[in-house]
Image (cartoon, rainbow, N blue to C red):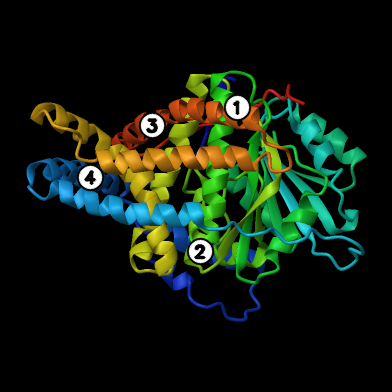
Amino acid sequence: MPANFWHENDSYNELDALSSLLSEFSEPEESDESVEESMLEVSASLTSGYKGRRRKAAVVLTVVWGGTIALHLVSWGTWFVLGMTTIFGIHTLGLVFTRARIAPAPLSGDLTNCPTVSLLVAAKNEEAVISKLVKNLCSINYPSDKYEIWVVDDNSTDKTPELLEKLAQKYPQLKVLRRTAGSGGKSGALNDVFPLTTGEFVGVFDADAQVSPDLLRQVLPLFDREAVGAVQVRKAIANSGTNFWTKGQSTEMGLDSYMQQQRIARGGLGDLRGNGQFVRREALVRCGGWNEETITDDLDLALRLHLDRWDIEFLSFPPVMEEGVTTAVSLWHQRNRWAEGQSQRYLDYWKAIFSNRLGRVKTFDLAMFLLIQQILPIAAVPDLMMSLVRNRAPVMAPLTGLTMSLSVVSMFMGLKNERKEESLNAAALIAIALQTLRGTIYMLHWLVVMVGTTARMSVRQKRLKWVKTVHEGSHD
């Protein structure tokens, strides 16, 4: 699948920690302000102090590399790593043996008083998939007067505008906002349309999404607990059988879904994945909407929701289907953007995180996740270099081995859970094991991505564009 450059009006400087954000996270008070005014105030707070991402990324790289080298030189370095491995090992056992939460029963019967929902799609040059998406969303089994569909045509130059015009005449639920100018990419498009929406809950989909008719009936009961600010639906790859890369992405989604459900079950952080995310309107307003100064709006919003004391739930069934990229180049661009966005949110909100705003359980969960996803891959380069120079095993080997073991177990369990309604005989389990092996090889690309992204962020002043995946729409 080719990649298409979607240029942003990236006028932002490199970002600073959002120290002013904490003041916005105080307990909400009753106010007569409009939604637009509330979001503008919080958004102004978010963007007022954005400076210094490059400097902070350089500091992180220096500390991790320097610390890894130091562990090779000091006598207690190995013991320190063994201690960290023990702590992470205990956390790992807790993750694996925690019982996943049982999803509440879906909505049924009389839905006269069911919640209202606004479904949003930011579309740019999506002529290949936009018709199928609209037809799918308009066929959801939910009262038609209780949900609306907003598609933001973000200055498309293909046939997307014409197709949306015809679809709007056919489907009364479909509303189209034509965005001829504006910055912020997907975040800017969503912020522009949000004041026009009316739903108590807001769902966000990519243009290549395909969902089950009962999706809303399954998602909304997860919001019964007032502390739940958002729900992420499990993502699955529609073209998973195409080649090695799409098969790898399918196993990666299995790993992600298992880690999500287990972390949430233990009281840790749930995350948002953009496609198939639902957010409580109140929570979205309090957080200031979508951040236009980040390249991964979903990851940024997820952390801000947690900092604002909201929980994020995860729905395993039914999944939202999406296209996987089919070439190594497209995968490289996409994963670099994800990795940079992941790093951005830690660099931006580190003061809020260190102030224990998340609470002890979530802060510890985040620390463990940060260790294995960010720090360990970055440390792999100096660790390998020092091991060659000193002719000894990498000092991080115990922690790396445990991380790899967790990844393999999580991938296997995630793939197995996707077939929960099937009878898994020996042949099926062997097939899942082979998928896991292939997926483990595929996941090694994250080592290169994380090291390269962190190094680039340390020297590059700003990111002027991000790469948008072109959707082909040829998968049924």
Q: Secondary structure at mark 1?
A: helix
Q: Mark 4 is on which residue type?
A: Val
Identify whether 159 is placed above or below 105. Answer: above
- The residue nearer to you, when weighing 313 against 12, is 313
Residue 188 image position (x, y, % from top left): 58, 47
Q: Which residue is mark 3?
A: 449
Which mark is on residue 239?
none
- The residue nearer to you, when weighing 198 against 443, is 443
Which mark is on residue 64?
4
Determine which quarter of the picture holds residue 378. Answer: top left
How many numbered tags mark residues here?
4
Nearest-to-viewer mark from 2 and 4: 2
* 471 sits left or right of 261 in the view: right
Which mark is on residue 267?
2
Q: Tell me the distance, in whole angstroms, between the alpha carbons under discs 1 and 4.
A: 39 Å
- Badge 2 crowding class, 10 Å Cα cut-off, few under 14, some 14 to 19, many 20 or more, is few
Nearest-to-viewer mark from 2 and 3: 2
Nearest-to-viewer mark from 3 and 1: 1
Q: Secondary structure at mark 4?
A: helix
For image coordinates 69% across by 36% down, the residue present is 321
Identify whether 163 is placed above or below 276. Answer: above
Q: Quadrant of the C terminus?
A: top right
Q: Secondary structure at mark 2?
A: loop
